[in-house]
Image (cartoon, rainbow, N blue to C red):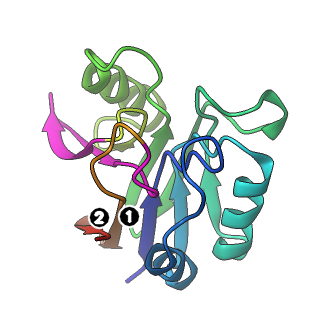
Amino acid sequence: MPRIAIVSDSHVPDREDEIPESFRERVADADRVVHAGDFTSPETLDEFETLADGKLTAVFGNLDPQHLDLPAVTTLDAGGVTFVVAHGTGSHEGWADRVADIAREEGGEDAVGVAGHTHSVTDTDHDGVRLLNPGSVTGADPAEAATMMTADVADGELDVAVHETD
């Protein structure tokens, strides 16, 4: 059963200094890693690429430097689940509608939408589309804590856990 680490909104070094060690370990131990944007520096992208050991699926966030050369939307198929990854850029109002529309358009009716941007942990069904937002992996403002998700996937089933640092 593959385990996917799902993170977003690192904001290193513009808002936070580093990724919490416990989250670095979860990312390194995962079979696949999804980052939903806002690394905010090439060094942070490099750090996640190293931690993920070639198993990183990542998208461009609204605060990422243009030269990071990441897609705005991408997909990952794992364990019979299609994850559609985007940052979710735009007003926080309407976030769920935007992400659900992108997930349906890019991955079909059964796709799972993964996005960040709001820094708020979300695991919900929105108009028939499951949406996941891991919050901010560093606890960057406006988040109240550093959070991430792990997802165990097999045979089209998804078991998601939220992790938070102190």
Q: Is residue 135 above or below residue 100?
A: below
Question: Residue 91 placed where, x, y %?
Answer: 36, 14
- In reply to whether residue 18 is colored magenta, the answer given is no
Q: Which residue is mark 2?
A: 156
Q: Is residue 127 located in the magenta-colored stretch of the structure? A: yes
Where disc 1 sits, the SS reads loop
User: Which portion, as a residue range, is magenta?
Assistant: 120-140
Which of the marked residues, 2 or 1, is nearer the chain's N terminus? 1
Give the residue at x 51% y 45%.
Answer: 36
Question: Residue 27: horizontal and vertical position, in percent?
Answer: 52, 74
* Label 2, label 1: how far apart the Cα atoms are: 4 Å
Q: Residue sitting at 30 percent across and 47 percent down?
A: 132
Left or right relative to 58: residue 104: left
User: Residue at coordinates 32% horizontally, 44% vertically from top-left?
Assistant: 143
Quadrant assignment for the N terminus: bottom left
Q: Is residue 111 left or right of residue 124?
A: right
Are discs 2 and 1 less than 8 Å apart at CB?
Answer: yes
Which image quadrant for residue 137? bottom left
Mark 1 — residue? Answer: 80
Q: Quadrant of residue 166?
A: bottom left
The disc labelled 1 sits on which kind of residue? Gly
- Residue 113, which numbered label? none
Residue type marked 2: Gly
